[in-house]
Image (cartoon, rainbow, N blue to C red):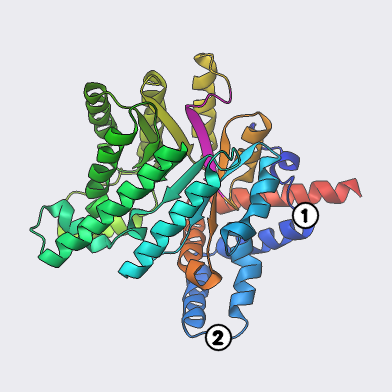
Amino acid sequence: MSIFNDTQIAFADKSTSQLEKAKWMFTMIQYPSLTNIGIDALNFTIKNNFPFVEGIVKSTLFEQFCGGVSREESSKVVTQMFKHHIGSIFDYAIEGKEEEKMFDHTCEEIKQNIKFAEGNPAIPFVVFKPTGFGRLDLYAEVQKGKELTTSEKTEWEKIRKRYEEVCQMAYDRNVILMIDAEETWMQSSVDDLVNEMMEKFNKEKAIVWNTIQMYRTGRIEYLEADLKRAQEKNYFLGYKFVRGAYMEKERARAQEMGYPDPIQPNKQATDDNYDAAIEFVMKNLDKISAFFGTHNEKSTELAMDKMNAKDLANDDHRIHFGQLYGMSDNITYYLGNQKYNASKYLPYGPVKDVVPYLTRRAQENTSVAGQTGRELGLLKKEIERRKNLR
């Protein structure tokens, strides 16, 4: 019997009509072919500005997986969740924009999030995607060690400057800044930048945090090398641990280009790798702080058990847990109820611009084994419980 099965706690913030809508949506998402047809239709209608579509999206997928169109609109969700000891991590969910003007705009948005988070316990972290600050292809060129043209050098310097500015602001305002992970063919160039920022800004504590995808091979070895360098240079490490989000794309590219598959051979190997990361953190808490971003109940409980074995307080400042908004409320709300450091990733942005994020969420729910079925089972259980109370 899972400790995460109390649906009364899980859906404390949801009305019965919201639960019914979520049940309908997850029922649709569980059919891959239907999901893919729906995604194609959605992308087409949004791209061609069909009337009414934006309103339909806002009242369905957007309402389920996003906080609002703006930081201010999302604040209502932030306030409500914090009543349950659950923090919010604003995620400016604009994807696929590749103009310098947009990169500058995203950087400014992250700065505003840092200002908003300063001194606000309801916002424990600020996060940004590396591709929000620069072109994926340029990161990839840098990773390959290719000689950059003059204009590319200028562009790369702008990316570095954006990192430097937000990390400096986070340091000045004592706000933890997490940098998300991306595809393997650009991730090493991101890691190099983040490590540089860690060395500069994490001398007193972990302010700048990297993200480690545990569905990748060689990650424990990467962590060991990171730790060795941090010990030698005397700075702290912060990590968000996830399983990963680009498996099909990674495998296909590796096969197409003839290099070794960078992803673990199966789900069990990924789960074992994730749990090894939990063990690694718990052995090195003098240097490492961690955010366990996972929808996996076993990994979550394992981390809790390890904390208990080390006699750590549930709200020890070095250990955090998190899930995506609109998913796995049974885990997040249980953790909040037990006063662990629990948070939700809370995406926001204009409906039209957030559609790529929303379609990715729908596809992930279709492809992650058991995720949609579990969500549906919990929703049905809570709806039934409420009916029996009448």
The residue that mark 1 highlights is 15
Q: Nearer the viewer, residue 113 or 260?
A: 113
Q: Residues within 10 Å of mark 1 (few under 14, many from 20)?
A: few
| Residue placed furthest toward the front | 172
Q: CA distance from mark 2 to mark 1?
A: 30 Å
Q: Position of residue 349 (x, y in %)?
A: 53, 64
What type is the residue that disc 1 sits on?
Answer: Ser
Who's the residue at 37% across and 38% down the image? 208
| Residue placed furthest toward the left | 147
Q: Position of residue 256 (x, y in %)?
A: 19, 62
Q: Position of residue 195 (x, y in %)?
A: 27, 38
Q: Nearer the viewer, residue 128 or 12?
A: 128
Q: Nearer the viewer, residue 373 or 194?
A: 194
Residue 94 falls in image quadrant: bottom left
Q: Residues within 10 Å of mark 2 (few under 14, many from 20)?
A: few
Q: Which of the marked residues, 2 or 1, is nearer the chain's N terminus?
A: 1
Q: Is residue 255 above or below residue 386?
A: below
Who's the residue at 51% across and 62% down the image? 362
Q: Is residue 333 above or below residue 186?
A: above
Q: Magenta segment: does it hold 77?
A: no
Judged from the image, the secondary structure of the residue bearing numbered disc 1 is loop
The residue that mark 2 highlights is 50
Q: How many marks?
A: 2
- With 14 as the anchor, is 282 left or right in this view? left
- With 242 as the anchor, is 41 left or right in this view? right
Q: State the mark number for residue 112.
A: none
